[in-house]
Image: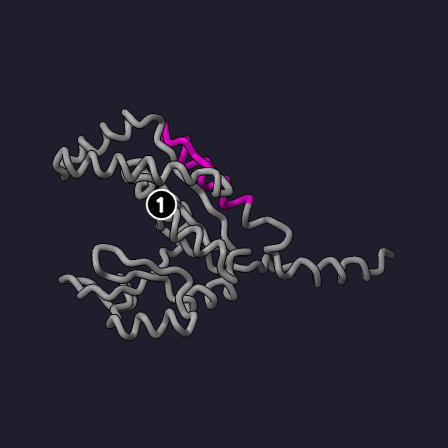
C-alpha cells in the first residue's frame, strides 16, 4: 500500500515573542516538504520580494473580487493593507497530500477552521512560560520602544485568551522540548484514519485475499 493521504493545514499561532517563528523553522527543517502558505496582499512589493514566492501581490479591487468569489480561505485588514490566503493553491496541496504551514493569529486560524477545508486543519497554540518571560524576550530583541512593547503585551493577553479554541497547546519553556512536541503532533495527525485516503481500498482488498 502506498501511504496516500490528504494534505494538512497546520495552523500555528502565538502571541509575539512566544517562539512561534523559531518553532516553525524547526518544523520545516525536520520536514523540508512542509511549505509555508503564500498570502495575497494589497501592499506594494518590497525590494527582493518575488510574486508567488513571498506574496501574491494584488490591487485592492482584485483582492475584493477574490473575496466576493469566495477565493480566499481567510483574510484581514492590517494597517490599511489587506492580507489573505488564496483558496486554490491550498486545495491543490490537500489533493496532492502536501502539508501547508500557516503562521496566523487567532482570527486567521478561526476563519480557516470554519471554512470548507477546516476538516484538514490541525491547530496549535504556543504559550510563553510566563508574561514576565514574554516581556523579557520582547525587550531583549531591542527593536521596539517601551510604548510599542506595552502595546504588544496588551495584544498578547488578547491573543492568549483564545488558547482553548486550538487542538493542541504547547507551553514553550524549552525550545528543544517544544520542537519535539510539534513534530510528534504532526506525525500523529498524519496517521489519523480519516486522512489516509488510500486506506479503505487497501483494507477491502486485504479482506478479499485468499488466505491459502
Q: Indicate yes or no whether the magenta region holds residue 179.
A: yes
Q: How is the image coloured?
A: one colour
Compared across the picture, whether 148 is left or right of 197 comes to left
- Quadrant location of the C terminus? bottom right
Q: Nearer the viewer, residue 54 or 166?
A: 166
Furthest toward the right, the residue is 212
**Residue at image coords 47%, 46%:** 123
> Where residue 39 appears, x then y in whole percent?
32, 61
Vertical order, 149 against 123 (above or below): above
Q: Secondary structure at mark 1?
A: helix
Compared across the picture, whether 18 is left or right of 211 comes to left
- Assess disc 1: are there few (<14), some (14-19) or many (≥20) residues with their C-alpha within 10 Å of its C-alpha: some
Vertical order, 7 against 178 (above or below): below
Q: Indicate yes or no whether the magenta region holds residue 99.
A: no
**Residue at image coords 41%, 34%:** 178
> Where residue 150 appears, x then y in whole percent?
20, 34
* Magenta stretch prevailing secondary structure: helix
Q: Nearer the viewer, residue 6 or 71?
A: 71
> Where residue 110 appears, x then y in whole percent?
44, 51
Residue indicated by mark 1: 24
In magenta, the rendered stretch is 169-188
**Residue at image coords 52%, 62%:** 116
Amino acid at each position: 500500500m502506498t501511504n496516500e493521504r490528504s494534505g494538512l493545514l497546520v495552523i500555528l499561532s502565538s502571541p509575539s515573542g512566544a517562539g512561534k517563528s523559531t518553532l516553525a523553522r524547526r518544523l520545516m527543517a525536520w520536514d523540508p516538504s512542509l511549505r509555508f502558505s503564500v498570502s495575497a496582499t494589497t501592499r506594494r512589493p518590497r525590494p527582493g520580494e518575488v510574486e508567488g514566492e513571498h506574496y501574491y501581490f494584488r490591487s485592492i479591487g482584485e483582492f475584493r473580487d477574490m473575496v466576493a468569489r469566495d477565493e480566499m480561505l481567510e483574510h484581514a485588514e492590517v494597517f490599511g493593507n489587506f492580507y489573505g490566503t488564496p483558496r486554490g493553491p491550498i486545495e491543490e496541496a490537500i489533493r496532492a497530500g502536501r502539508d501547508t504551514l500557516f503562521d496566523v493569529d487567532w482570527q486567521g486560524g478561526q476563519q480557516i477552521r470554519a471554512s470548507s477545508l477546516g476538516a484538514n486543519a490541525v491547530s496549535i497554540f504556543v504559550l510563553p512560560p510566563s508574561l514576565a518571560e514574554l516581556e523579557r524576550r520582547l525587550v531583549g530583541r531591542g527593536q521596539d520602544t517601551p510604548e510599542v512593547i506595552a502595546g504588544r503585551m496588551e495584544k498578547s493577553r488578547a491573543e492568549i485568551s483564545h488558547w482553548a479554541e486550538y487542538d493542541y497547546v504547547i507551553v514553550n519553556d524549552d525550545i528543544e522540548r517544544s520542537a519535539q512536541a510539534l513534530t510528534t503532533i504532526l506525525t500523529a495527525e498524519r496517521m489519523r484514519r480519516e486522512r489516509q485516503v488510500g486506506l479503505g481500498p487497501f483494507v477491502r482488498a486485504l479482506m478479499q485475499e485468499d488466505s491459502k
